[in-house]
Amino acid sequence: MAREWPIECPRMIYVLNNLGFQNLRHLQFIRLDHNLIQALVERWCPLTNTFHFTIGEMTITLQDVQILLGLRIDGPAVVGPNVVGQGRIWATWPDCCDELLGMHPSRETVYHDPNDEEDVATFRMGSSQIDSMLPLRWLRWTFYRESYDDLAPEIFLRHVRAYILFMIGCFLIPDTSRIHVSLQWLPLLVDVDSFSRMSIGGAVLAHLYRELCYATRPTRTYIAGCVALLQVWSWERLYIGRPTLRVPQIIDLAGRPLGCRFVSFGQYNIFSYFITNGSYKYIGGLKIGYVSYLQAIR
């Protein structure tokens, strides 16, 4: 879903560059290898928050988050203020949404995709969800534009908040549904400059740790969190199923994080390999079977 909100407008790109979120519009195009992710989950130990391999233990660090995704890892922790409720800044979450985004989704309203009139939806969420969650499709259908140049500053700021919320809900810190985003993030975006100085990378890593622990439970079917980080980390550290980087080996990333060098490989079929007994085995195509991944990791 992250691919459904491309950013090409120079005005929006300039603001995202200043906020430190400019790389998200590139990293969102990494195609996930679900077999690799499933094999890595099986090697995760919730007691130590590390992967257990035959060569020892490994884990994703804050340095990996900064180098691979380009997210900020220093600064204040991402902790939401308690600002909604009786006697606080906003009485209800819809009130908070109305002030910071200019509107909120109605329970029975039929919404249309601006690019496809036949694509309609009625967001029939439960009473608890309608007061604390936003549908990601509603955010995209309401705030996506090819150009933001003609917007007034206050209206443009609402679109910036909506885009950051969208990327949090579908790429950085998604839940298992990947169709909603919690409104707890919205009060942090009252001042987007202050939000950009927070350790968003630390929040992404902590959430991924927690979701990896949940995913090891027998009753859990899906995994949430920034699994693109998990996959790119595996490609950089383990080389299992890693796309073959064509020459020249050193790619000019033009200030982008290291994970961006794998973005183009999500668009077409290439050769991959995994390590078996110290030798490389080349396999045509990006996808390798789950059993092959598991054997290589073990």
Image (cartoon, rainbow, N blue to C red):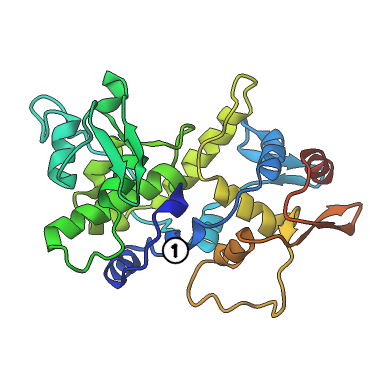
Residue 204 position in % (x across, y down):
46, 46
- Residue 259: quadrant of the picture: bottom right
Residue 108 position in % (x across, y down):
23, 26
Residue 98 position in % (x across, y down):
14, 40
Residue 252 position in % (x across, y down):
57, 79
**Residue at 60% over, 26% down:** 221
Q: Is residue 77 visible?
A: no
Residue 57 appears left or right of 213: right
Taking depth in this image into account, of 4 and 277 the one nearest to the observer is 4
Q: Quadrant of the C terminus?
A: top right
**Residue at 67% over, 52% down:** 234
- Residue on which the image places disc 1: 23
Is the residue 253 above or below the residue 91 in the image? below
Q: Amino acid at mark 1?
A: Asn
Is the residue 112 above or below the residue 250 in the image? above
Residue 12 appears left or right of 93: right
| Residue at the left extreme, as displayed | 87
Taking depth in this image into account, of 122 and 280 the one nearest to the observer is 122
- Residue 223: quadrant of the picture: top right
**Residue at 24% over, 49% down:** 189
**Residue at 61% over, 49% down:** 32
Q: Residues within 10 Å of mark 1 (few under 14, many from 20)?
A: some
